[in-house]
Amino acid sequence: MVCPETSSDEPLTPAGRLFLQPETDIVIHCIIRGKNPADMDAIKSAIKSSLMVQHPRFCSLLVRDKNGFEHWRKTPIDIGQHVVVLNNRLDKSGNFIDQTQGSTTTEEDDEAAVNQYVADLSVSSPLSTDKPLWELHVLTAHKCAVFRIHHSLGDGISLMSMLMANCRRADDADALPRMVPDKKTVIKGEKGRDWFWLFGVLWWFLKMVVFTLLFSMEFVLRSLLVSDEKTAITGGDGVELWPRKLATAKFLLDDMKLIKRAVPDTTINDVLLGMVSSGLSRYLDHRTPNVLHEGLRITGVAMVNIRPQPGLQDLSKLMKSNTKARWGNKFGVILIPVYYHKGGNDPLEYLKRAKAIVDKKKHSLEAYFSYKIGDLVMSLLGPKYACMLNYKLLCNTTFTLSNVAGPLEEISLAGNPLSSIKVNTSSLPQALTMHMLSYAGKAEMQILVAKDIIPDPEFLAKCFEYALLEMKEAVLRTNKA
């Protein structure tokens, strides 16, 4: 929409402009499933009174001035334009079922049907710019709703924080969801050993400089020249337009925590990366046995929240323009290599290799460098060249991986207790994207694939689940010994 600029218009951030380019036009999908049937009156009433429609991003049109620069312009909200209601049941192919014939479905059938519906939305289904860039699709027969929110409105942390601010604990209708507590690290010197402490700080700083230089150089090369060796899961230029399939891998957080405790100073993210490394090796062995060489590098892209406070944020702080924990797209990108191995006697080797990689990444400023370089390219060269570099990076890597820690206990939305929350994004040039979200002791990872490249995402999901169980069994054997 091209309009004359007004004094109340707010220009988009550089990251927001990037996500509006045709090659990187990304929509975030959040799938929430209720335990009870959807009450449309309650849902619409909850939306009207929610913090979401009070936020400027969710009640603003995207407009362009005569020079082509994008702005947000406040507009009245018509809830009816944003809520899409589907009353008919879907089958596993995402097609409507003839209700007159009658049929029985399982929870797995429901999940597969909703996954395929979202997979179809993930390709060439942009949000209309005639209204603010969000929608809510309610699939009443499946007790499910799908939030579609354009990435230019905010990143996953912003949008999940917004969702949590509108939810309440299932066991206390007045209490906000309880999230993972913050962990703060305090560095202290020991009395009488200040020289040792100072040496440790200097050594830490030197390693940070070296790792930042190495990883930043690698990031630039990956954005311009260097690409992964082609495998059975490799995407590429134009693959974002190919049809998609979506599958779900399911894990218990207690299993991940048990494995985490087996290796000192390990995190859930380390366990996740080790599990992905093992699962991809298992899957590639199945698809192309005895073809790939041992130690083949497979590079992923991970999004890192660079706000001062980790995890989901206090919405009131996000909405303040002068705070460091601001609303919007405040994330950097890091490259996370995993390596193909045929396995061995110790499944925990995948975890130890993943931890070594992540420890070096955490010791660098790669995420901040990627965020700043993106801002710089956007400011100096414009969105066309910033989009070209971002798109090239995705074409030169194999997968995208993200992980968000969700509520610790069950929550409700619009008075309906939720049985699951899952997230994913619209399609990318990569043939494989994975987004994990934890909720009430469980973790579910949405695996979106280009189905002409990876035709069996359900088997890939099982590979990840088996990888975690192998690690768990290895830990239990060790504990018994």
Image (cartoon, rainbow, N blue to C red):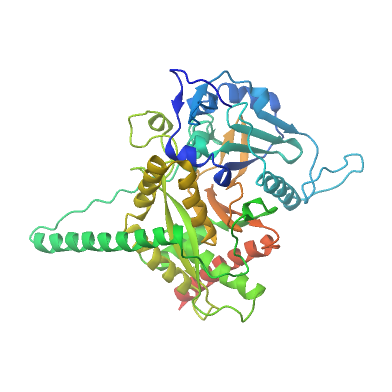
Residue 86 x/y as whole percent = 76, 35
Which quadrant is the C terminus positioned in?
bottom left
Residue at (55% x, 78% y) in the render = 342
Residue 388 x/y as whole percent = 50, 50
Q: Nearer the viewer, residue 152 or 385?
A: 385
Q: Is residue 403 visible?
A: no
Q: Is residue 31 above or below residue 287?
A: above
Q: How many marks?
A: 0
* The quadrant where residue 434 appears: bottom right
Residue at (51% x, 56% y) in the render = 392
Q: Nearer the viewer, residue 127 or 101?
A: 127
* Residue farthest along the right direction in this orientation: 101
* Residue farthest along the front direction in this orientation: 67
Residue 303 x/y as whole percent = 46, 51
Residue 237 x/y as whole percent = 59, 57
Which quadrant is the N terminus positioned in?
top right
Q: Is residue 449 visible?
A: yes
Residue at (51% x, 39% y) in the render = 160
Q: Is residue 422 above or below residue 259?
A: above
* Residue farthest along the left direction in this orientation: 192
Is 386 left, or right, of 240 in this rendering?
A: left
Q: Nearer the viewer, residue 18 or 299?
A: 18
Q: Is residue 40 above or below residue 453?
A: above
Q: Is residue 361 above or below residue 414?
A: below
Is 268 left, or right, of 133 in this rendering?
A: left
